Image (spheres, grey):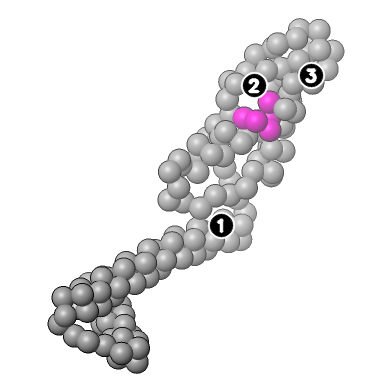
Amino acid sequence: VWRVRDTAKATLGVEDHETYLRECVEAALARVPVEPLGTVRSSADVAGDTLTRLVAADAAPVGLEVFSVRPVRVEYAPEVAAAMHRRRIAALDAAQRASVLTSVVDSVEDTVTRLTVRGLVELDDYERKMLVKDLTVAFCAGRGDAGH
């Protein structure tokens, strides 16, 4: 979405405004970083906001004002698309592993604390370490079975 802001600059600076803006968008696409999926805002929203800023900056000197740029069709070479896909999957996988690990550690800590605070067991450092290790293995194994 755009308009001519300065008629004199727009008339003298660019012969065909739509072609110029298309070229600005294509140039800006090469500068937009690819974000992993799973963020609060969708990748299309982030890309659109970034594209809008870049194209607006490119178009301002020739008298054009750009309000919004939204990608509607993006084509990538197969190897680029595959690399982007692998990167997104890796980011999602890392986030999931971190979440599972945090959950397991919290569960182990809670279990050991409850057992010792309630006086159900008295543990020296070695016994505490062994219990933490055994509970961690048990909780991780249990999570693996739950997913299958």
- Quarter location, residue 128: bottom left
Residue 78 at least partly seen: no
Disc assigned to residue 84: 1
113 on left or right of 96 = left
For disc 2, the neighbor class at 10 Å (few under 14, some 14 to 19, many from 20) is many
Q: Position of residue 52 (x, y in %)?
A: 62, 30
Q: Position of residue 63 (x, y in %)?
A: 76, 15
62 on left or right of 49 = right
Disc 2 target residue: 66
Disc 3 target residue: 62
Query: Which is more N-terminal, label 2 or label 1?
Result: 2
Magenta stretch: residue 58 in it?
A: no
Q: Position of residue 98 (x, y in %)?
A: 42, 66
Residue 30 at least partly seen: yes
Q: Residue at x 79, y 19 (%)?
A: 62
Q: Are marks 1 and 3 in contact (CB under 8 Å)?
A: no
Picture quarter with the C terminus: bottom left
Question: Is residue 82 positioned above or below 117 on the image?
Answer: above
Q: Residue at x 52, y 63 (%)?
A: 86
Report helix, strand or loop for mark 2: strand
Q: Measure how far apart labels 3 and 2 are at the Cα level.
A: 11 Å
Report helix, strand or loop for mark 3: helix
For disc 3, the neighbor class at 10 Å (few under 14, some 14 to 19, many from 20) is many
Magenta residues span 52-56
Report helix, strand or loop for mark 1: helix
Q: Residue at x 35, y 88 (%)?
A: 125
Magenta stretch: residue 53 in it?
A: yes
Amino acid found under the numbered disc labelled 2: Val
Q: Position of residue 47 (x, y in %)?
A: 56, 39
Query: Which is more N-terminal, label 3 or label 1?
Result: 3
Amino acid found under the numbered disc labelled 3: Val
Amino acid found under the numbered disc labelled 1: Met
